[in-house]
Image (cartoon, helix red, strand yellow):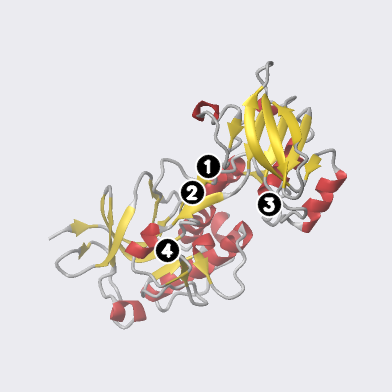
C-alpha cells in the first residue's frame, strides 16, 4: 500500500497565475503544493519576455517579467508553500483505497467531490507520485518555442546576431536594431529600446499593426523607423561584420536594405499543450473548458489562466489573478463545504 501525504490543493504550473494561486491558497490556510515542470518559477514572462514591460496589473505602472516573478515569490514567502521544480505531471488518476492512505485529511463523504471521487487524485510525475484532494491547473500556454524566421542563416547567429528573446536590455544600448513583427510584443520592444538604441527599425508584413491601439499611436509618434508592408527576404554579413537585412515588399518589386547590429524576431511563440490530452480533460481548440467556478470536466480539478477558455475570456495576467481566488475557494469548498467567506487579506497578512 502506497503511503503518501495528501495535499488539499496541488497547483500545476509555476507561472504568475500558479504563483498567485499558491499565495492565496496559503492565505486561506490550505495545505498546498506547487509543481513546475521547468527548473525555475515565473512562466512565460520570466523565460520568454524577461525584460518586456507588463502594464495590465492594477496598481503597478509597468514591471518586467523578472521583477514580477521576484515580487510573486516574495508574496508567496508569507506562507512558504511547498514547491517542487523540474516536476512534470504525466497523468492525473483517481486514487483508490489500495493506492493511498490519507495521513491527515478527513473528507466529508457528502461533498460533491467526495461522492464523485472519494479519494482525490494521484499525480504521476517524473519525480514520483503526488497525492492530492484537488488539482488546480495553471500551465499557461504550455511549452513554448519561438516562431522562427523563415530565412536560412547560419545557426551560430542565433542568440548573437539574430535573437528571439531579450535577456539583457543593457547589451543592446547604442546599437542599431531591427525588429520583425507586428503584434504587441514587437511594438513594446520597439518602444522599450528606442531610447536606448542608436536606431530601431520595425518590420511588418502588413500595413496595419495588430497591437494595442494606444501602443500603435505611441509608436507612430516615436522615432522608430517603420517598414511596412515588407518581409525579410535574406540575411548576410557586411564587410564591417554587421547584419545586412534584405526587405522584400509584399506588393511591388523595390527592395529595401538595412544594416543593423542585431535582428530581434518577434513572431510569437508556438505552444504545445499535449499534456492536457493525457489528463483527460474536456478541451476546446486545445484549451480547457471550465465552468463559472473554473472547474473542469473532472470533479475536483480546476484550471485558470491562459490554459482555459470560456465565453468572454480575456488572456491577461490581471484576469488570471482574478480567476485564482475563485478557483481556490471553489476547490476548498469541495473539501470543506462549511468553509466561511474568506477574510479581508489585511486580517491575515497583518498577523
Disc sitting over residue 144 in the figure:
2
N-terminal of the two: label 4 or label 2? 4
Mark 1 to mark 2: distance in Å? 10 Å
Please give the residue where the numbered disc 1 appears in the rendered image: 47
Labelled disc at residue 136 = 4
Q: Where is the C terminus found, in terms of image quarters? A: bottom right
Residue sitting nearer the eye, 335 or 279: 279
Q: Position of residue 303 (x, y in %)?
A: 46, 66
The one nearer the camera, 68 or 46, is 46
1 vs 2, front mark? 2
At x 53%, y 48%, the residue is 44
Q: Which structural element holds mark 2?
A: strand
The numbered mark, 3 or 2, whose residue comes first in the sequence reads 2
**Side of 32 where 259 appears, left or right:** right
Disc sitting over residue 194 in the figure = none
Contact, mark 4 vs mark 3 (Cβ under 8 Å)? no
The answer to whether residue 88 is seen in the rendering is: yes
Which quadrant is the N terminus positioned in? bottom left
Quarter location, residue 130? bottom left
Q: Residues within 10 Å of mark 3 (few under 14, many from 20)?
A: some
5 on left or right of 18: left
Farthest residue in the top direction? 240
Amino acid at each position: 500500500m502506497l503511503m503518501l501525504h495528501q495535499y488539499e490543493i496541488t497547483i500545476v504550473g509555476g507561472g504568475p497565475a500558479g504563483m498567485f494561486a499558491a499565495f492565496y491558497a496559503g492565505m486561506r490556510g490550505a495545505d498546498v503544493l506547487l509543481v513546475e515542470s521547468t527548473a525555475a518559477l515565473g512562466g512565460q514572462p520570466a523565460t520568454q519576455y524577461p525584460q518586456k514591460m507588463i502594464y495590465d496589473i492594477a496598481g503597478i505602472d509597468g514591471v518586467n517579467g523578472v521583477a514580477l516573478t521576484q515580487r510573486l515569490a516574495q508574496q508567496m514567502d508569507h506562507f512558504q508553500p511547498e514547491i517542487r521544480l523540474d516536476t512534470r505531471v504525466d497523468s492525473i488518476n483517481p486514487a483508490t483505497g489500495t493506492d493511498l492512505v490519507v495521513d491527515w485529511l478527513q473528507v466529508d463523504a457528502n461533498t460533491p467531490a467526495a461522492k464523485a471521487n472519494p479519494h482525490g487524485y494521484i499525480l504521476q510525475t517524473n519525480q514520483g507520485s503526488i497525492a492530492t484532494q484537488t488539482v488546480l491547473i495553471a500551465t499557461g500556454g504550455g511549452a513554448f518555442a519561438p516562431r522562427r524566421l523563415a530565412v536560412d542563416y547560419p545557426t551560430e547567429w542565433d542568440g548573437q546576431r539574430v535573437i528571439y528573446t531579450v535577456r539583457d536590455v543593457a547589451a543592446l544600448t547604442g546599437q542599431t536594431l531591427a525588429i520583425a513583427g507586428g503584434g504587441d510584443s514587437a511594438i513594446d520592444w520597439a518602444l522599450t529600446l528606442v531610447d536606448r538604441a542608436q536606431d530601431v527599425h520595425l518590420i511588418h508584413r502588413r500595413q496595419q499593426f495588430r497591437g494595442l491601439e494606444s501602443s500603435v499611436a505611441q509608436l507612430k509618434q516615436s522615432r522608430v523607423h517603420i517598414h511596412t508592408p515588407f518581409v525579410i527576404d535574406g540575411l548576410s554579413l557586411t564587410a564591417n561584420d554587421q547584419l545586412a537585412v534584405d526587405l522584400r515588399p509584399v506588393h511591388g518589386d523595390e527592395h529595401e536594405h538595412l544594416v543593423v547590429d542585431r535582428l530581434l524576431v518577434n513572431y510569437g511563440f508556438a505552444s504545445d499543450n499535449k499534456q492536457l490530452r493525457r489528463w483527460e480533460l474536456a478541451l476546446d481548440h486545445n484549451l480547457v473548458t471550465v465552468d463559472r467556478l473554473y472547474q473542469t470536466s473532472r470533479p475536483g480539478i480546476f484550471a485558470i489562466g491562459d490554459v482555459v477558455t470560456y465565453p468572454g475570456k480575456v488572456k491577461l495576467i490581471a484576469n488570471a489573478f482574478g480567476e485564482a481566488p475563485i478557483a481556490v475557494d471553489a476547490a476548498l469548498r469541495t473539501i470543506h463545504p462549511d468553509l466561511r467567506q474568506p477574510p479581508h487579506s489585511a486580517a491575515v497578512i497583518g498577523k
